[in-house]
Image (cartoon, rainbow, N blue to C red):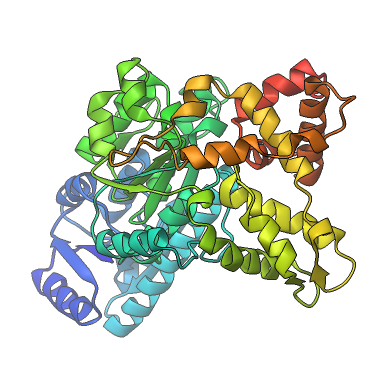
Amino acid sequence: MRVLIVDDEKNIRESLGKYLSLEKIDSLGVENGETALEAMQNESFDAVILDLKLPGLSGQQVLEEMLARGITAPVIMVSAHGDIPDAVQALKSGARDYLVKPFDPAELSIRLHSLIKNKRRENTMEAEARTSLRNSGSNLLLGKSQAIIDISKQIDKIAGSSATVLITGASGTGKEIAAREIHNRGANKDEPFIAVNIGGIHEGLMESELFGHEKGSFTGAAGRKQGLFELAGRGSIFLDEIGEMPMALQVKLLRVIQERKVRRLGGTVDIPINARIISATNQNLEVYIKEGKFREDLFYRLNVVKIHLPALAERREDIAMLAGHFIKKHSSRNCPSLTAEALAKLENYSFPGNVRELENLIERALIYCEDSIIRVADIDLRESAAIQNTINQQTPAAEQTCKDTDANTDTCAGTSTSNNAQRAATPVDTLPHELTMDEIEKQAIINALARCKGNRTKAAELLGVSRKTILNKMKQFALDE
């Protein structure tokens, strides 16, 4: 926590600074409004203690200039007894609280903590309302396999740093879960965690969503909006499907990482940001670089620390633990148990959809089972096979063969030769033979939309395809009407 103290009396600045340090609150004291605005332009503060009467710019003028520049740190206005009407006016202008001199430093500390906590809550709520944030509130980085143990140790090592992290792995392996673990184990775990699916944002709106915009910057911009980088505060921003970011936006993201500042669309002022940047992809970005789809300089900025998540088929010893977790998560009654045969069926399945597919299978099994036992018959792999056929039809061959090459093996994106053989053995022949591939795809999309209550983004995630793909298919099958 860092606070800016703006007061022309040196003894007040110093005494407040000493008291706040005892409360483990870092502070910076400045003597006038001009210096305060310069400080706020160069670094981020969680709150500002602002004296109403200052030489040069008054506290009211500083507050108005902060709002004009898009500086959103909450302000506690400090005034003398005779200036209470002015302090009330400051509240109407945007100050969050005010204190009358002389005041108790303990009271100031209580109000500061409350103010900052409320501001963080507002940031998180606003960001969640504008993103497809999926916060399950539980740790899915579960398992006893050596791969998961090693990843957990790696996360422990990097959680305390501010280095950018690139998470790779096939769809459904739990990249967002790993990102949340990095955030939750860090010093700023109480700050916002903002998850952004780059592939789920319309290209024309992406810059506004990430960096914000000013009033009138484009048609429909009725007011100023903070971007998700600002709303993340001192927390973490997770950029999923980073390979889907347009080249023009990649240039701007590179600037943000280099300068630690953002500029709103239509704005002229640079706003400092302190959020940790974590990105993820199921693509081979090195191949994208060679094809001119991704900037090499941005790749090296994002790839300071790399975490690779293996496919579920490569850590089959974790399936029982994960299945048990999903049973508890989705069961509305006494938690059913898996028979040994049902568990064996899961452990012998190839899981092309990885952990996400396992969760879907368990959720379906809970619907099908008639008592407190999940049997082999309750594990329905036919729908999973239909979904995978849809994905295979939509995914380019290059992505099918190698999404992320491991430098130490000949495997790609967590898929080994033996796993490919298992995929070939998927019981596709159990599907009705009278259905065409288009009919299978159409039915898979209808089922996904029904399960997601019409939410197309969630349906795309369930199927493991991009939102653009599902929209195109919906149009092809006349489902968009």
Q: Decide if residue 109 is in sight here.
A: yes
Q: Which residue is drawn at 76% across and 27% down?
A: 441
Which residue is nearer to you in this view: 388 or 470?
A: 388
How many labels were placed on the picture? 0
Residue 12's x, y, as percent? Answer: 15, 73
> Compared with residue 328, is residue 431 higher up or lower down, i.e. above or below?
above
Residue 422's x, y, as percent? Answer: 60, 41
Q: Can you tell which quarter of the image residue 338 is in?
A: bottom right
Q: Residue at x 43, y 55 (%)?
A: 178
Q: Can you tell which quarter of the image residue 188 is in?
A: bottom left
Q: Residue at x 81, y 71 (%)?
A: 373
470 vs 372, left or right, is: left
346 vs 195, left or right, is: right
Which residue is nearer to you in this view: 19 or 361?
A: 361
205 vs 41, left or right, is: right
> Compared with residue 101, is residue 369 higher up or lower down, i.e. above or below?
above
Q: Residue at x 31, y 84 (%)?
A: 106
Q: Decide if residue 86 is in sight here.
A: no
Residue 459's x, y, as percent? Answer: 70, 39
Of the 4 image quadrants, the one containing the C terminus is top right
Residue 468's x, y, as percent? Answer: 61, 24
122 vs 462, left or right, is: left
Which residue is nearer to you in this view: 8 or 213?
A: 213
> Compared with residue 216, is residue 120 higher up or lower down, i.e. above or below?
below
Of the 4 image quadrants, the one containing the N terminus is bottom left
